[in-house]
Image (spheres, helix red, strand yellow):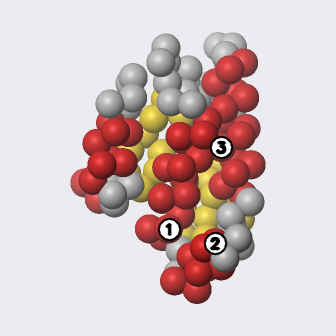
Amino acid sequence: MAVPRNALKKWEMVREFALGLPVATEEFPWGETVAKVNKKVFVFLGVDDGSHPLGVTVKLKDEEAHAHALTSPGAEPAAYGLGKSGWVRIPLAEQGAPAAELLCEWVEESYRTIAPTKLIAELEGR
């Protein structure tokens, strides 16, 4: 399955943004790309090899952001029970999928939910 270029471009922008956050690291558990802070995942980026549709999964505690994310085409509460605690999976290749800028805002929101206060203060200082 070919990966749509616009979806891949968004995915790359979101990945780069996530890894630019204070002390963010990239890991590959389960063959998936994830960004972590303090050993905790703040965004699941899935795989970019075309074996699964491109998407990002973020934790949105803010009710408005959470509701907004769920209105994205094809978006759904995350699998494995993660949806119950605010995780949302947003596909990137769907017609009308969110712009990279909005996805990055959601990634930052997810980061703020997971990161320790000290790192959030560092982010505020940027």
Q: Nearer the viewer, mark 2 or mark 1?
A: 2
**Farthest bottom residue in view:** 118
Cα–Cα span, label 2 and label 1: 9 Å
Q: Where is residue 5 in the image (x, y as percent from the top left)?
A: 72, 18
Residue 7 picture quarter: top right
Looking at the image, is mark 2 or mark 1 earlier in the sequence?
1
The answer to whether the residue labelled 3 contacts the one labelled 1, judged by CB atoms less than 8 Å apart, is no
Residue 71's place in the image compared with 107, above or below, is above
Quarter holding the N terminus is top right
Provide the residue designation for mark 1: 112
Q: Is residue 98 left or right of residue 104?
A: left
Provide the residue designation for mark 3: 14
**Element at label 2:** helix
Cα–Cα span, label 3 and label 1: 16 Å
Looking at the image, is mark 2 or mark 3 earlier in the sequence?
3
Residue type at the position of mark 2: Leu
**Element at label 3:** helix
Q: Position of residue 55 (x, y in %)?
A: 54, 34
State how many labels appear.
3
Visible residue check, residue 116:
yes
Residue type at the position of mark 1: Arg
Q: Position of residue 120 (x, y in %)?
A: 56, 76
Q: In this view, does 85 lie to the left or right of 5?
A: left
Q: Which residue is drawn at 48% across and 58% down?
A: 109
Provide the residue designation for mark 2: 123
Q: Position of residue 40 (x, y in %)?
A: 54, 70
